[in-house]
Image (cartoon, helix red, strand yellow):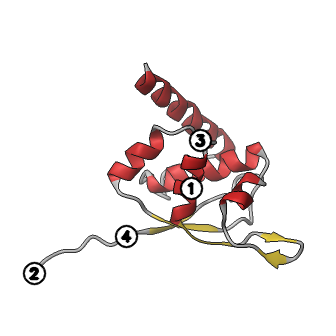
């Protein structure tokens, strides 16, 4: 009997950040795609389009109306909010367990640590 790997769908966790209440569901990517994403600048159109391609749903509204995920909508976010979305996405698709870090006091600090690590990795790849 053959085995087929399921494509996971993740709920991004913003519960311990200033974006608590934001709900974004994303589908996973292959390891090859993940490695490509890690080499990209996190504010490039290419990176944001990769993120966008994985979004299954979100609960974002403008003027009381639900908006569809789009590059323009991502670019309307302030830099800090976009950073939190990007890091939550990278954490989810990178396979970090939802149980890992439970009981941790500061989600934003953990996301900042991840960002610094990703930036270091990205810089060392470019050297």
Q: Secondary structure at mark 4?
A: loop
Residue found farthest to the left: 1
Badge 2 or badge 4: first in the primary sequence: 2
In front: mark 4 or mark 3? 3
Mark 2–mark 3 distance (CA, rounded to whole Å): 41 Å
Q: Quadrant of the C terminus?
A: top left
Give the residue displayed 80% in from the left and 71% down from the top.
61
Marks 2/1: CA–CA distance: 37 Å
| In the depicted structure, whether residue 83 falls above or below residue 15 | above
Q: Residues within 10 Å of mark 1 (few under 14, many from 20)?
A: few
Mark with earlier residue (3, 1): 3
* SS state under label 2: loop
Residue 27 horizontal/vertical position (percent):
47, 67
Disc marking residue 49: 1
Query: Which mark identifies residue 7?
Result: 4
Q: Counting residues from the N terminus, which is met first, the one under dot 4 or under dot 3?
A: 4
Secondary structure beneath label 1: helix
């Amino acid at each position: 009997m053959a085995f087929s790997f399921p494509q996971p769908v993740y709920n991004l966790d913003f519960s311990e950040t200033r974006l608590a209440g934001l709900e974004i569901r994303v589908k996973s990517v292959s390891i090859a795609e993940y490695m490509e994403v890690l080499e990209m600048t996190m504010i490039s159109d290419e990176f944001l389009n990769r993120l966008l391609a994985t979004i299954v749903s979100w609960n974002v509204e403008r003027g009381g109306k639900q908006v569809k995920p789009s590059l323009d909508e991502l670019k309307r976010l302030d830099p800090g909010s976009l950073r939190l979305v990007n890091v939550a996405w990278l954490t989810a698709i990178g396979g970090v367990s939802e149980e890992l870090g439970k009981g941790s006091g500061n989600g934003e600090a953990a996301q900042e640590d991840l960002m610094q690590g990703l930036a270091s990795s990205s810089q060392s790849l470019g050297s």
